[in-house]
């Protein structure tokens, strides 16, 4: 029988195949290890540089954000650097605009702005267009002495309504949205003495909205519970500091129930009430701020999943930043100096790096102040945007639908100034 013949080069081919298999095997093992080691080295270098050099803040911002998104998503992430805003566009308001709020009041997808005019018993709505130029305006009659405006869908009909504080008549008012840019006449509800600031939430989690109102001249907060069919089910009053001005709502202890914090103007404190998980509040806690705290806002400033607090101090021209320890305690406080009369603050991610920045209005000059977050809750030296003069209240929103956060402020010159983000 004839033996099968084996080509002379077969051992050599088998050796080559074996070598390729080993190479592929080691490649599969070493490649992920190399990627992990490289990522760890980059993160270590970033932390080292951010600890010892302020020059590298911009590099840290970009690199850390890109790494975070590579590890968690499949989409690229591009922070903005440097921050740029267009010069303001100016729009006439009524007499002495005191507060403003944003929402989608008509059927389109463009953000609208409502301004309450304190001295002429009106609100003015600036309906948002595609390009961020607010050419369509409409004025609605209210009551003299309106100080604060909020926007929320109170009756759950998918049309946001307007809520006002009437300081001179000790009432709040709700204007129900009928669609087609028409609103019902204001329906009023009694609260405490000189209501100044209002926030809407659902404190008892029953899917009916509640309104928290600060009563400036009686050092209290009134909560109106369970709005339904044009009325509230019940109310409660809580004592806070003297000459209370501002209020913000947030879940400070991560129990899924909203809490609230106020600025106590004459006591130089903030007051915090924790929700008892039934919509009621007890055990007021106070923390010192600067002198004469006024405006207030809440957000997670250092991305630790705990809500922090920022308030303005009118008499010292400063911002107080109070950090949450994770249990609803605020024993760490940082201070940032601006000067003048700082009365309003807003919080938003202006440069798209996933960290919240601070925007403040100085009623004593003609500037909006921006503090960019260094990604750890510490903020860079401020940048300024020039306004028409004496900005009182500031807010943020994407007014031209380009995915960037813009800024709006009302001024003593009876104007609304809108700054479009060009970052």
Image (spheres, rainbow, N blue to C red):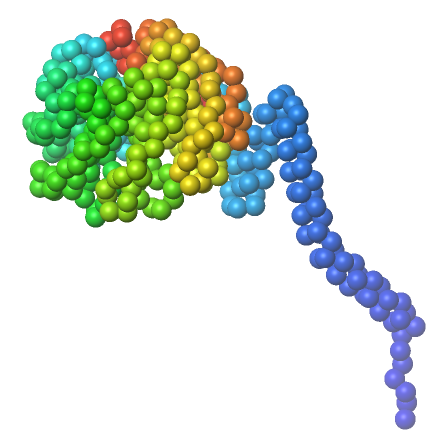
Q: Is residue 190 left or right of residue 328?
A: left
**Depth order, front residue of 102/318:** 318
Q: Which image quarter: residue 411?
A: top left
Horizontal side, residue 325 vs residue 175: left or right? right
* Residue lying at the far front of the rendered structure: 283
Foreground of the two, 309 or 73: 309
Pick out the residue farthest to the bottom: 1
Q: Position of residue 316 (x, y in %)?
A: 40, 11
Q: Is 364 located above or below residue 261 in the figure?
A: above
Where is residue 259, by image quadrant?
A: top left
| Residue in the picture at 81% in, 65% down | 17
Q: Quadrant of the N terminus?
A: bottom right
Image vertical order of residue 240 relative to residue 243, above or below:
below
In the image, 372: left or right of 57? Answer: left
Residue ID at (30%, 13%): 392
Residue 321: horizontal and vertical position, in percent?
Answer: 44, 25
Task: Name the residue rendered at 20%, 38% in the picture.
Answer: 210
The residue depicted at 10 percent of the width and 28 percent of the height is: 190
Q: Measuring from the top left, give residue 332's x and y in whole percent.
A: 47, 29
Q: Is residue 314 visible?
A: yes
């Amino acid at each position: 029988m004839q033996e099968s013949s084996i080509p002379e080069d077969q051992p050599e081919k088998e050796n080559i195949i074996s070598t390729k298999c080993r190479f592929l095997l080691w490649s599969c093992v070493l490649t992920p290890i190399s990627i992990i080691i490289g990522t760890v080295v980059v993160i270590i270098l970033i932390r080292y540089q951010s600890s010892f050099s302020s020059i590298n803040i911009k590099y840290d911002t970009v690199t850390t954000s890109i790494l975070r998104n590579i590890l968690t998503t499949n989409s690229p992430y591009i922070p903005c650097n440097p921050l740029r805003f267009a010069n303001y566009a100016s729009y006439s308001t009524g007499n002495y605009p005191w507060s403003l709020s944003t929402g989608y009041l008509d059927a389109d997808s463009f953000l609208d702005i409502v301004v309450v005019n304190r001295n002429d018993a009106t609100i003015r709505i600036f309906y948002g267009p595609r390009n961020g130029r607010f050419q369509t305006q409409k004025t609605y009659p209210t009551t003299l002495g309106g100080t604060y405006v909020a926007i929320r869908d109170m009756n759950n009909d998918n049309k946001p309504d307007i809520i006002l504080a009437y300081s001179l008549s000790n009432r709040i008012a709700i204007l129900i949205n009928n669609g087609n840019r028409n609103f019902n006449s204001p329906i009023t509800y009694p609260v405490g003495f000189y209501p100044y600031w209002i926030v809407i939430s659902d404190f008892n989690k029953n899917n009916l909205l509640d309104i928290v109102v600060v009563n400036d001249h009686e050092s209290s907060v009134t909560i109106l519970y369970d709005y339904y069919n044009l009325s509230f089910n019940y109310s409660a009053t809580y004592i806070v500091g003297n000459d209370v001005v501002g209020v913000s709502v947030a879940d400070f202890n991560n129990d899924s129930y909203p809490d609230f914090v106020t600025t106590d103007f004459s006591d130089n404190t903030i007051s915090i009430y924790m929700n008892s998980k039934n919509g009621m509040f007890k055990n007021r806690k106070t923390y010192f701020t600067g002198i004469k705290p006024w405006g207030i806002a809440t957000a997670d400033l250092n991305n630790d999943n705990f809500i922090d607090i920022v308030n303005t101090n009118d008499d010292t021209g400063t911002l107080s930043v109070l950090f949450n320890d994770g249990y609803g305690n605020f024993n760490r406080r940082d201070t940032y100096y601006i000067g003048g009369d700082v009365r309003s603050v807003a919080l938003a991610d202006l440069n798209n790096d996933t960290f919240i920045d601070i925007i403040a209005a100085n009623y004593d000059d003609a500037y909006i102040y921006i503090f960019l977050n260094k990604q750890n809750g510490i903020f860079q030296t401020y940048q300024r945007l020039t306004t028409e003069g004496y900005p009182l209240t500031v807010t943020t929103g994407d007014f031209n639908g380009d995915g960037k956060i813009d800024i709006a402020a009302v001024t003593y010159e009876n104007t609304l100034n809108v700054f479009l983000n060009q970052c």
